[in-house]
Image (tube, coloured by chain):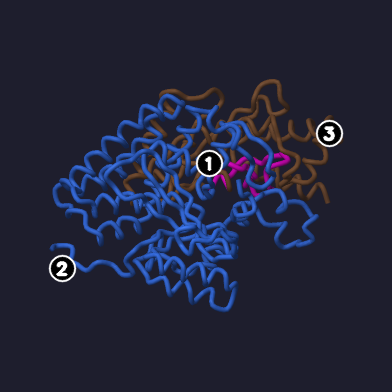
Amino acid sequence: MSTNCRRRLIRDFKRLSSDPPGGISGSPCPDNIMLWNAVIFGPVDTPFEDGTFKLLLTFDESYPTKPPTVKFLSRMFHPNVYANGELCLDILQNRWSPTYDVAAILTSIQSLLHDPNPNSPANAEAAQLYRENMKEYVRRVKATVEESWLDPEEQEKMAVEGASGGQ
Amino acid sequence: MKAGDLPPIDDPEPLTGGELGNAELSTLAPSALFDLNQAAMDDAVPDRPLIAPLAPMSVLRAEYENGNQVFVQQIDWLGEHGYIGIRRTRGDGDCFYRSLAFAYIERILNSADPILAAVQAVSRLESTQEMLEAVGFQRLVFEDFLEMFTTLIKRIVEPEPGVPMLTAKGLLEAFNAPEVSNSVVVYLRLLTSAQIRIDPDAYAPFLFHPELAIPMEPREFCENFVEAVGKEADHVQITALTRALCVNIFVAYLDGRLRTRSVSNNDKGKGKEREAVEVEFVEFQNGEEGLDPVRLLYRPGHYDILDSRCEEPDVDMEMA
């Protein structure tokens, strides 16, 4: 394994645990430093307030030259988040720079929550509601906030029920 | 600025929504699209090493023989002027930085006093840390990259235990190891960015979005087109980086254009104009003394290294 990558991940973790930006947390899996679990707390005064959204970050040897893959584990309703949890964020794709560390990635995602980019929609319905029907958008987001408090199994169950109920 | 000369830049916007009319593409997640794009680009340059061994210019010429003849004539012009070799780099958007870094170290190896040149380069590079910190980069973000770079140069003077002295062959190997090669590229990107950010007035008039041609703030320009991996360098970045490194660099522009030129008076005594094929060298002079300038070859969207040799020196010659 690349020593550069490992050293950097250890430093990222040190920085994130000693000087954590508000509303985010993250740590590597105990048995695999290349896999990180993270939580973003929904920013206050936004529809996402009080949500605890879980994410998985997957690094490979090329970090920090290449970005990690980042995915929401919690179900999201957001213009820039795909149904499978992947997100559309420039710094994770074509604007990556090794100056971004895990704290910076999570902070960017946090600010994306309250400042979506409707021009680059990953969820067309969320993007449309965000533009045209804010009230309904907020209602749908708040539903995901409540779901985010459940543990993953319960959440999955709700998602299945929600899907069958909607048809 | 020559926005049109830049390679296409991945723009996430056209890839989303249904307007594309390509349902298969539009249903892909951005990361999948990115991978697809990356794979397509990798396919376009199959197995091209990050930095290739020296090759004769005729290899490049052969690629243009059935195309634009001005290119062919420009390649011949280079050959006639002593540039008989080319060291090609992978077209991954980092080629300017990688070419410059390779040539920068190779020049130290080949200098009259490699130890002195190496010591000077290391001290120069280490002194740039202050500038990076002054513009707000954290030491922990850049120190690994810098260390990788300086460790490589220090191998010219005194390698760490168990590591061989740096030779031409060793340098080529190091630059084809992604971890080393990309670390050096990243440090040069950060250094370029720092140079622009610390002296914004000098660069602000030249900071344009390469596609939209609209002016950009230094910070925005640096984040998007300097620090970001895979974003090609243009005139501004070259000016800033060579200034930060205090290195002279000549870039030969292989652009397929004919130039109108007045024949010099020394030639035949007449000042008449004619169409001539030649290659323009754009010079970035930064007052460096003692070493030859770095010479790169630019073709629209890509940089390689120019050389007056057409094959790698063999080991015996290196020992001599």
Question: What residue appears at the point 37 percent right and 32 percent down from the top-left corner?
Answer: B140
Image quarter of residue A92: top right
Secondary structure at numbered mark 3 = helix
Rendered view: B144 above or below B276: above
Name the residue beneath numbered marker 3: A136
Chain letter of the residue beneath label 1 in the structure image = B
Mark nearer the viewer, 3 or 1: 1
| Amino acid of disc 3 | Glu
Secondary structure at numbered mark 2 = helix
Question: What residue appears at the point 68 percent right and 35 percent down from the top-left corner?
Answer: A147
Name the residue beneath numbered marker 1: B236
Q: Which chain is brown?
A: A
* Disc 3 and disc 1 on one polypeptide chain: no
Quick one: A92 or B73, which is closer to the camera?
A: B73
Label 2 – label 3 distance at C-alpha: 76 Å
Left or right of B198? Residue B29 is right
